[in-house]
Image (spheres, rainbow, N blue to C red):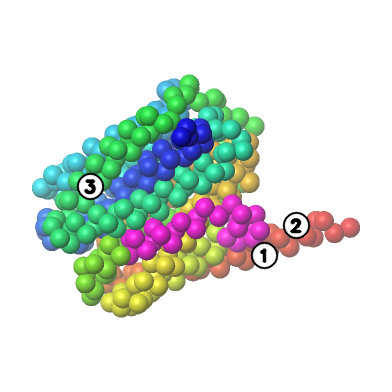
Amino acid sequence: MTLSAGSRVGLAGAAVVGVAFGMARYAYGLTLPDIRQDLELSEPVLGLIAGATFTGYLAGLLFAGPFAARRGSRAPTTVGGVCGVGGAVIVTLAQSPWSLAVGAVLAGSAGGWVWAPYSDIVTRTVARRQRPRALAIITTGTSGGLVVLGGLAVLAVLGSWRLVWAGIALAAVAAAVVNLRLVPRTGPAPSPDERHGASSLARTLGVPAAYSVVYFAAVVVYFTYAADVLTRGLPAAAVPALYAIIGVTGMVGVVTGAVAWRLGSSRVAALCLVTVAAALALLGTAGDSMIATVVSATVFGPGYMIGSAVLAVWTAELVPDRAGAAFTGCLVVGAVASVAAPVLAGAVIPELGLGVLLVLTAVVSLLGGVALMLYGVSERGAVAGETEP
């Protein structure tokens, strides 16, 4: 059976994004408890390395656009695959904090290289009627990657945390090969439309950018320390189960477009912050309860995946003629928050404790959701007032 262009690009994108986001980007948090014990690292050092992984992600985001402009949109996804393989191999063999940091940063950069270019690949190679389906498949790749990561986590329970990273390296090789075989080579990306200046774009995206800061900071704290919480009071099998549940429940992200159309993007984003807050609070206050952990993961999965997808929908609505640049701008802001959050967390955990940190992060996410909900109400009220005769 011959696959359509949309199916080929969608499957390849799901594989690459699944490895880069669902596996390489969050495997550090999954293996953190064992890394701490094996390499005898302190909380501040672990936090610095966690923040550095997102510095790599930020670098990938910043370099992907210019590289695509010179070499074509598929080129950054190939670089991302190479970074995923190389970084995972280095972490697998790491014997010191420095080698661990280098590998984790390189693996973390893969997500930055691959995310935005796929939007352009779909636009340039897939028929218009097939694009929504292709993008939905690609987005769902993150959830699929988390499910596989949960399966790999069993290797850490039975053997060593290094086996998890070795599995990620193999998965990254397979995804890179699939990407090269199924995604057609494209010419240099067209120059962006400059009708919106940088200052105008920044003003338009102020609210989505603020959402991005809170959302990414909260998500990073959850993924960085969830495994740490579970290993302190539950059987080792709870960690793979957590990631698998997040991946499975996150599959609902494919309906983000329809939900945003009905409720409005800002309201959907607000609800995602509230659900992420609930997941963090459960983890911080009852992380030693299997029931609470299952509920936390079940709630977090949709909040995480829809919260990510709605940012793409929201920015495209606000700046339709520069949707890629708008989306990338918000991702860069979110990446900065992703760098700062674990560094700050690692610094305060020795004083406050991990449970308190998770609850405080939940409060910040909840307040952000409430503020965004109030913004949506005021915005709709202003629009209604303008339409009155």
Q: Amino acid at mark 1?
A: Val
Question: Which of pointers 1 and 3 lies earlier in the amino acid sequence?
Answer: 3
Which of the two residues, 186 or 90, is positioned nearer the viewer here? 186
At mark 2, the secondary structure is: helix
Establish if 57 lies above or below 299: above
Q: Nearer the viewer, mark 2 or mark 3?
A: 3
Q: Amino acid at mark 2?
A: Val
Residue 289 in the image, given as x and y percentages of width and height:
30, 78
Residue 269 - label: none
**Quadrant in the picture for residue 37:** bottom left
Q: CA distance from mark 2 to mark 3?
A: 52 Å
* Left or right placement of residue 210 versus residue 291 in this view: right
Residue 167 - label: 3
Q: Residue at x 41, y 38 (%)?
A: 12
Magenta residues?
242-268
Q: Residue at x 78, y 60 (%)?
A: 384
Residue 385 in the image, given as x and y percentages of width and height:
79, 60
Residue 377 - label: 1
Identify the residue at the far right of this view: 389
* Left or right placement of residue 207 versus residue 49 in this view: right
Magenta stretch prevailing secondary structure: helix
Residue 197 appears in the figure: no
Question: Which of pointers 2 and 1 lies earlier in the amino acid sequence?
Answer: 1
Q: Residues within 10 Å of mark 3 (few under 14, many from 20)?
A: many
Residue 10 in the image, given as x and y percentages of width and height:
47, 40
Q: Quadrant of the C terminus?
A: bottom right
Q: Residues within 10 Å of mark 2 (few under 14, many from 20)?
A: few
* Left or right placement of residue 225 versus residue 201 in this view: left
